[in-house]
Image (spheres, rainbow, N blue to C red):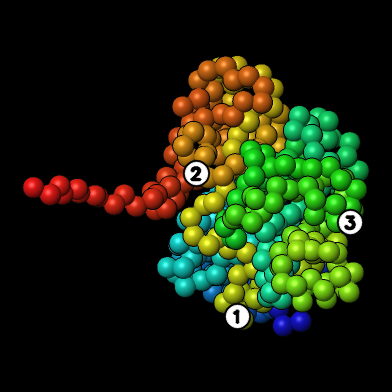
Amino acid sequence: PGMDLVAISNRTLSEAERAYRQAGVESVRVVETVAQLEDAISRGQPAITEDAMLLCRAGGIDAIIEVTGTIEFGARVALEAIEYGKHLILMNAELDATLGPILKVYADRAGVVITNADGDQPGVIMNLYRYVKAIGYKPVLAGNIKGLHDPYRTPETQRAYAAKYHQKPRMVTSFADGTKISMEMAVVANATGLRVGKRGMYGFHCEHVRDALTLYPMDQLLNGGLVDYIVGAEPRPGVFVLGYNDHPIQRQYMRYYKMGEGPLYVFYTPYHLCHLEVPLTVARAVLFHDAAVAPLGGPVAEVITVAKRDLKAGEVLDGIGGFTCYGMLENYDVAQAENLLPMGLSEGCRLKRDIPKDRAITYPDVELPPNRLSDRLRAEQTAYFAPVQVPVAMVWPS
């Protein structure tokens, strides 16, 4: 209510039409120009187009929802939407994890909101994180719950599963091999300042989310906090936050509320409802100029590229959800110091040398594809958030 989906862009028009049809809309108009799209909007005619930039440029549209999961194309859509004053809702953790901080700089300059979405894990985690903080507890870990983690899964191993659930093999491969959860937790790290406890995160196996209370090093939790995940725990596919409060009266009441002895407590949401919650993010951005999830500033965590098998010089990396590499979460300062290749920029990179299985791939290991917007934005992001070098002079007494 109060919100209209006025247009859908897809490179395959029949898919855009199918999306409307599944929502009960039978009559749609194909548009090829901004004028045609604006006319359709004024007449209340749902529109479809192959050209996503029309949606970014047309008047009468308040917000764009970007759901491609791509980096290069997603970045182009993001900049175009921002330039034309549209709020931008990302159902694209891959783009957000790779270029979110610099895209937010552009959005802030333009006076529009850029935000990840409610419904996906980063949004659900952030709502829970804010809740825990609001009731007086210190969030010391933001966590995700996975059913499976095997970094060597490929589109071939996932083909049958993908077909069963009408999904794309590459997408479900990124879920299984840990790349997707790494992207999601990078988004959360950048939005909270929480760091990574070890390369790839701990990823403990346990039976219930309550078991997470005893799994993590307390010194890391209390000194900056962590993003992480657990595997095989109920309730799946939920999220959780560990909150800390050592006040004796609060601990007394938490015992009464059956929340445990404390001072560490687990709060969890047992589900994430994906597309069902996205309209909440749209309303939040348009009506309240508020983001569900957005970077605090510069990057805190980085999803690095790791060889999925022994790779040979001359091979071209096939990127997220492919056969050649998987993503692992690392602290941004470590990734920068080691010159590690971001997973979001890996697709299309040609190897200059052999890389053994499970080794992190560096920038010097690869030749980047030419003329990519994503590489230019990445360089801009690195420079923009580089530590300020303060000149220091020492004067000795004579």
Q: Between tags 2 and 1, which lies in front?
A: 2
| Measured Cα–Cα span from mark 2 to mark 1 | 34 Å
Residue type, mark 2 in image: Asp
* Of residues 78 and 229, the one drawn nearer to the viewer in this rendering: 229
First of labels 2, 1 by sequence position: 1
**Mark 3 Cα within 10 Å, few/some/many (few <14, many 20+)?**
some
Element on which disc 3 rests = loop
The quarter holding residue 292 reads: bottom right
x and y percentages locating residue 29 in the rendered image: 70, 67
First of labels 3, 2 by sequence position: 3
* Of residues 230 and 84, the one drawn nearer to the viewer in this rendering: 230
x and y percentages locating residue 175 in the rendered image: 76, 43
Residue at image point 63% right, 38% down? 199
Q: Can residue 95 be seen in this view?
A: no
Residue type, mark 1 in image: Phe
* Of residues 114 and 207, the one drawn nearer to the viewer in this rendering: 207
Q: In this view, does 113 lie above or below 156?
A: below
Residue denoted by label 2: 333
Residue at image point 54% right, 55% down? 100
| Image marks 2 and 1: residues in contact by CB distance under 8 Å | no
x and y percentages locating residue 392 in the rendered image: 24, 49
Residue at image point 67% right, 22% down? 357
Residue denoted by label 1: 288
* Of residues 111 and 185, the one drawn nearer to the viewer in this rendering: 185
Residue denoted by label 3: 235
